[in-house]
Image: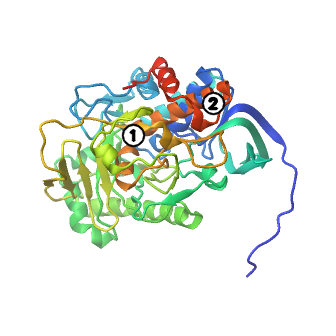
């Protein structure tokens, strides 16, 4: 078998030039592009799938978490996440849930796809869908562009600044920035839309999955879901996929295994809840990934930072979603709250409650993400990270990785790109006070 083959060098046509190029069209990436465009930059956004929204749309995860602190007393974020929810609410595509640590908004993922299209088009952003990032283009030690594969062939997009919102840190990794993987990465989940789920209303379906899962080759994990607003479709998240989605073979195996588990759950419920008229309505275009690689940045966020609510002078995001550890070595998940409570939840069993620290008279009610955790340690001053691969240890990542938190990192990266270009400084020298002021003026909650 041949180990390698030579690919002849070739000239790449320049298919686009802009101030800012965003790699990855998740809500994080789109929000980075929107912030920058509103500040006057010309922006292109590259997405290898056929729509924007990432996990919220392509992976069918149709819930976002609370904009309030852990006590539901203080508003800790607004910005583009709330703006998008408000747009969806006008179409009857949102269900609100008050004072719930699990989720605050359930939405229709298909409606969100179209809203994101309209936002991108309405801000003059150049979209590149079905376009895969191939590699960085470096000249004289400077990051000047990216090579992409489009339906029309290979080309180059040139830009003055770049934001990696790929989820896996592909641009950072291929540009030579240091990346790392967690010793126990959180497993992925393939969601699915089912019809007829109301037939299970009086059935302990979680208990059935736990009791009979082994018969259908199901790993014991965690199961939850939410109804799609305006329909009787139910989004089920009940699979647990351990393959490494940062590699080509692992990603492929994960997609196939996730779909197998969805069918296994369907078959299990058909057998043990035969009165339910379940129909599999839709599968995700991409598996829901919680964690692959991380990029080394100028600050690594820690579990202590999160659980003790450490404040940062360069904070650009606030969150209250609990530490949520999907285990690789045992079933179920562990929640840790800022008030010291710990809950081990396992489908079909009673929750096991304990404390990760003793009770105190006063507790933090939210945590923060500093700008420094978005700035890769690399030789390029025109590159920022945004999204779930930013620098965070295992416990911190288990809290900050949810979409409403990562959306804020996208907004911050877009605003920081504007400041870096305006002031002709590298990303690491962007004034955090000015960044926070611009974010606040744009609708963010800055604390």
Q: Earlier in the sequence, mark 1 or mark 2?
A: 1
Q: Nearer the viewer, mark 1 or mark 2?
A: 2
Q: Residue at x 13, y 56 (%)?
A: 350
Q: Is residue 89 above or below residue 384?
A: above
How much space separates mark 1 and mark 2, taking CA atoms? 34 Å
Q: Quadrant of the C terminus?
A: top left
Horizontal and vertical percent position of residue 431: 54, 28
User: Left of 363 or right of it: where is 17?
Assistant: right
- For mark 2, what is the residue? 420
User: Could you classify mark 1 by the number of other residues whose Cα lies within 10 Å: few (under 14), some (14-19), or many (20 or more)?
Assistant: many
Horizontal and vertical percent position of residue 224: 29, 49
- For mark 1, what is the residue? 62
Q: Which residue is at the front of the view, 73 or 121?
A: 73
User: Left of 217 or right of it: where is 438?
Assistant: right
Residue 280 visible here: no
Secondary structure category for the residue under label 2: helix
């Amino acid at each position: 078998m041949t180990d390698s083959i030579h690919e002849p060098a070739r000239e790449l046509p320049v298919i686009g030039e802009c101030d800012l190029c965003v790699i990855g069209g998740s809500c994080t990436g789109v929000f980075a592009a929107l912030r920058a465009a509103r500040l006057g930059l010309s922006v292109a956004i590259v997405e290898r799938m056929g729509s924007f929204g990432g996990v919220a749309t392509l992976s069918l995860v149709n819930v976002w978490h609370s904009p309030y602190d852990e006590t539901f007393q203080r508003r800790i974020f607004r910005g583009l996440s709330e703006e998008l929810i408000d747009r969806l609410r006008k179409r009857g595509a949102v269900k609100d849930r008050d004072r719930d640590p699990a989720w605050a908004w359930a939405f229709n993922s298909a409606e969100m796809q179209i809203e994101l299209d309209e936002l991108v088009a309405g801000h003059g952003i150049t979209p590149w869908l079905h376009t895969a990032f191939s590699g960085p283009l470096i000249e004289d030690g400077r990051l000047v562009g990216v090579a992409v594969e489009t339906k029309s062939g290979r080309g180059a997009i040139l830009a003055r600044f770049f934001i990696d919102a790929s989820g896996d840190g592909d641009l950072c990794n291929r540009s030579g920035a240091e990346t790392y993987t967690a010793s126990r990465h959180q497993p992925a989940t393939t969601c699915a839309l089912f019809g007829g789920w109301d037939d299970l209303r009086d059935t302990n379906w979680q208990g059935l999955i736990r009791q009979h899962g082994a018969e259908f080759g199901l790993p014991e994990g965690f199961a939850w879901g939410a109804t799609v607003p305006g329909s009787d479709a139910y989004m089920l998240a009940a699979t647990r996929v351990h393959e490494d989605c940062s590699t080509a073979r692992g990603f492929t195996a994960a997609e196939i295994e996730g779909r197998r588990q969805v069918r296994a759950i369907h078959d299990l419920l058909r057998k043990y809840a035969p009165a339910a008229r379940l129909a599999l309505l839709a599968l995700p275009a991409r598996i829901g990934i919680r964690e692959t690689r991380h990029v080394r940045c100028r600050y690594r966020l820690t579990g202590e930072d999160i659980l003790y609510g450490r404040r940062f002078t360069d904070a650009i995001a606030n969150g209250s979603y609990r530490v949520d550890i999907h285990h690789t070595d045992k079933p179920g998940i562990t929640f840790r709250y800022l008030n010291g409570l710990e809950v081990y939840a396992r489908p079909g069993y009673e929750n096991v409650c304990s404390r990760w620290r003793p009770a105190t008279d006063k507790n933090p009610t939210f945590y923060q993400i500093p700008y420094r955790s978005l700035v890769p340690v690399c030789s390029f001053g025109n590159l920022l990270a945004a999204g779930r691969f930013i620098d965070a240890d295992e416990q911190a990542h288990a809290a900050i990785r949810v979409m409403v938190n990562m959306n804020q990192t996208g907004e911050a990266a877009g605003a920081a790109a504007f400041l870096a270009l305006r002031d002709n400084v590298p990303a690491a020298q962007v004034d955090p006070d000015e960044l926070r002021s611009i974010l606040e003026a744009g609708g963010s909650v800055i604390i």
